[in-house]
Image (cartoon, helix red, strand yellow):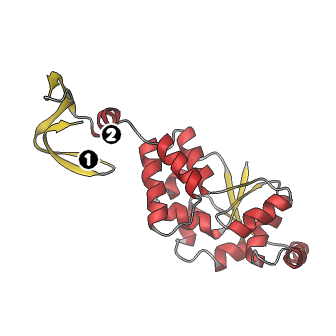
Amino acid sequence: MVCVTDANIWIDVHNADLLDAVSALPFTWRTPDIVLRNEVRTVDRALLVELGLEERMLSGLELNRILKLNVRYPNPSPRDLAVLVVADVDDGMVVTGDGPLRKTAEAEGQTVHGVLWVLDQLVEGEIITKARARAALNAMIDQGSRLPASPVQKRRRKWQTDGVHAFRHLCEPKLLHGHRNADGHALFHQSAGSRLKCPEGELQGADVQL
């Protein structure tokens, strides 16, 4: 599967510290040369190429097609429209974080996805955990990514890990069998002076109540 990307996708993925994870997906990642050279500014371009991103050179005919599309669709920039043209010529899909480009791709009958779809693929492929996907999503938003509220909340709920399971899986404390506090909550134990390392931070531990 060929995924043709704009710059926003790589900025979001970089902000979430998922470049290595995305490169592990069974997709061919490709972006037009004019996007990689002129739009990808906050991410190490050499690193992206090293991780497998293909830089796609545009032909004269493809450049002319971009100009014609820009007359019909003035909102996406010509560089963004290059993503659409490459996806069409290379029989790929558009992966973008740009609203006008998404609408244009849909109007042209192209398959289009965004960074939330990328996160879905990482979780479904068991490349990252649900907890890491949720943390990555929060990191993207904290760094200024504008994502639709409803799909974001849907994934936050979907990737919400049960407290006991999260501590067992991520922190690996030892359950004190038969030990519960007055409210009936299970108690976990970690050796004195040790720390439980979890996505939300660290807890200095002896007994941890969930």
- Secondary-structure class at tag 1: strand
In the image, 149 versus 73, the foreground residue is 149
Residue 57 appearing in the image: no
Which of the two discs, 2 and 1, labels the residue nearer the N terminus? 2
Q: Name the mark on residue 197.
A: 1
Q: Locate the C terminus and report the quarter of the image it occupies.
A: top left
How many dots with numbers? 2
Name the side, left or right, on which 136 lies relative to 26.
left
Residue 95 locus on image (x, y percent): 69, 58
| 128 relative to 138, above or below | above
Residue type at mark 2: give it: Leu
Q: Residue at x 86, y 61 (%)?
A: 108
Packing grade of label 1 (10 A; few <14, some 14-19, many >=20) is some
Residue 96 locus on image (x, y percent): 67, 62
* Among the 4 quarters of the image, the one containing residue 38: bottom right
In the image, 134 versus 19, the foreground residue is 134
In the image, 85 versus 156, the foreground residue is 156
Q: Which residue matches tag 2?
A: 170
Residue 154 appearing in the image: yes
Residue 14 locus on image (x, y percent): 50, 64
| 34 relative to 199, above or below | below
Name the side, left or right, on which 104 lies relative to 21.
right
Q: Residue at x 64, y 61 (%)?
A: 53
Residue type at mark 1: give it: Lys
Residue 72 locus on image (x, y percent): 88, 75
Q: CA distance from mark 2 to mark 1?
A: 8 Å
Packing grade of label 2 (10 A; few <14, some 14-19, many >=20) is some
Name the side, left or right, on which 117 lies relative to 189.
right
Asked whether the beta carbons under mark 2 and mark 1 sit within 8 Å of each other, the answer is yes
Name the side, left or right, on which 22 lies relative to 15.
right
